Image (cartoon, rainbow, N blue to C red):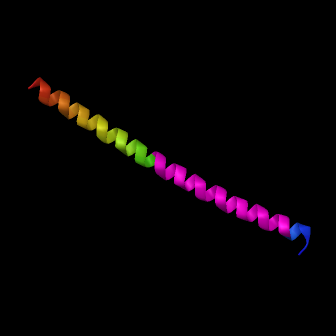
Amino acid sequence: MTSRKLTLAAVLIASAFGLASCGNTIRGMGQDTANAVDATQQAGRNVENAAK
């Protein structure tokens, strides 16, 4: 193999790993946001119940 082909292969592999890690980060942020919304809603219910 030529050095150009090796370089291209390395770039493609690095890109694949980079895109996979971005997907995991975005998925994790979505889960964190959903958990924060759930916790905020529960806190609102707790305050509402305490006020009754």
Q: How many marks?
A: 0
**Which residue in the rendered view is the most extreme toward the right?**
2
- The residue most toward the bottom is 1
Q: Position of residue 30 (x, y in %)?
A: 44, 48
Residue 50, image quadrant: top left
Quarter holding the N terminus is bottom right
Q: Which residues are magenta?
A: 6-29
Name which residue lies at 63% across and 57% down: 19
Residue 13 shown in magenta: yes
- Left or right position of 16 against 34: right
- Residue at horizontal 71%, vertical 64%? 13
Residue 17 magenta-highlighted: yes
- Residue closest to the eye, 1 or 12: 1
> What kind of secondary structure does the magenta stretch mostly adopt?
helix
Residue 4 against residue 20 in the figure, above or below: below
Say which residue appears at 41% left-offset and 42% top-offset. 33
Compared with residue 21, is residue 6 higher up or lower down, i.e. above or below?
below
Counting from the top left corner in percent of width and height, residue 40 is at: 30, 35
Residue occupying the point 42% across, 44% down: 32
User: In terms of image quadrants, where is residue 16?
Assistant: bottom right
Residue furthest to the left in view is 52
**What percent of the width, then of the height, locates residue 44?**
23, 31
Image-based side of 23 in relation to 46, left or right: right
User: Which part of the image, by quadrant, shows the C terminus?
Assistant: top left
Rendered location of residue 7, percent (x, y)? 84, 64
Task: Work out whether 29 lies above or below 21.
Answer: above
